[in-house]
Image (cartoon, rainbow, N blue to C red):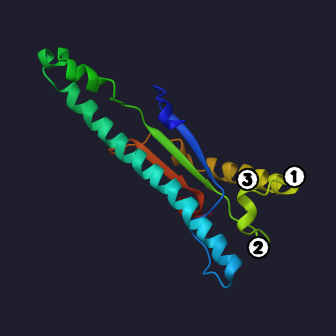
Amino acid sequence: MIDAGVPQDMLAFQVDLWSAKGQLPGNLPEVVTRQKEIQYSSRTRASTGQFKHVQRLRRALTTLLDRSPEELREHEDVKLLNTAVSPNVYNIVHLIYRARNHEGHSKDYEFSRLSMQDHWRAGYHDALRTLRHPEVLARPVTPDGVFTFDLEHDGRE
């Protein structure tokens, strides 16, 4: 959604089935589960970090081009750079599923009705708890224009 180039501020919910935080594995099945947790959650965090970096560059470019002399604004390179500017801000809420003890490494391909209802219920309650924090909806004032919120880390409930 964020990369779609929507020309407006955005509130996005990023849902992760795997948590970066976890117990030290005690057996081989737990090692497989922990490996997936680290692999999938680190990819999500890397994507968010990369987006924040690009957004910081886009906002800096916006400021720089706004300050450029009028005669420079008609140059073809400046016109091209103008296609990348973005004054938009983004609030990204990380909803991270906290696995039950009975779940293991199969939760990325186990889609039984019972499992899905459990995941939906957990996500719904996390979203409600998250929206009780007014800072989630506040306009970001950071240089990159991005505010990330993780209920477990930032919510302190």
Q: Amino acid at mark 1?
A: Arg
For numbered disc 3, what is the local secondary structure?
helix
For numbered disc 1, what is the local secondary structure?
helix
Q: Amino acid at mark 2?
A: Asn
Find residue 41 and report its image quarter.
Answer: bottom right
**Whole-Å distance between the Cαs marked 3 and 1?**
18 Å
Q: Quadrant of the C terminus?
A: bottom right
**Whole-Å distance between the Cαs marked 2 and 1?**
18 Å
Q: Is residue 150 left or right of residue 117?
A: left
Above/below status of 137 relative to 126:
above
Observer-side mark, 2 or 3, equals 2
Residue 101, label in figure: 2
Q: Is residue 61 left or right of residue 9?
A: left
* Residue annotated with mark 3: 125
* Residue annotated with mark 1: 113
Q: Are marks 2 and 3 in contact (CB under 8 Å)?
A: no
Q: Earlier in the sequence, mark 3 or mark 1?
A: 1
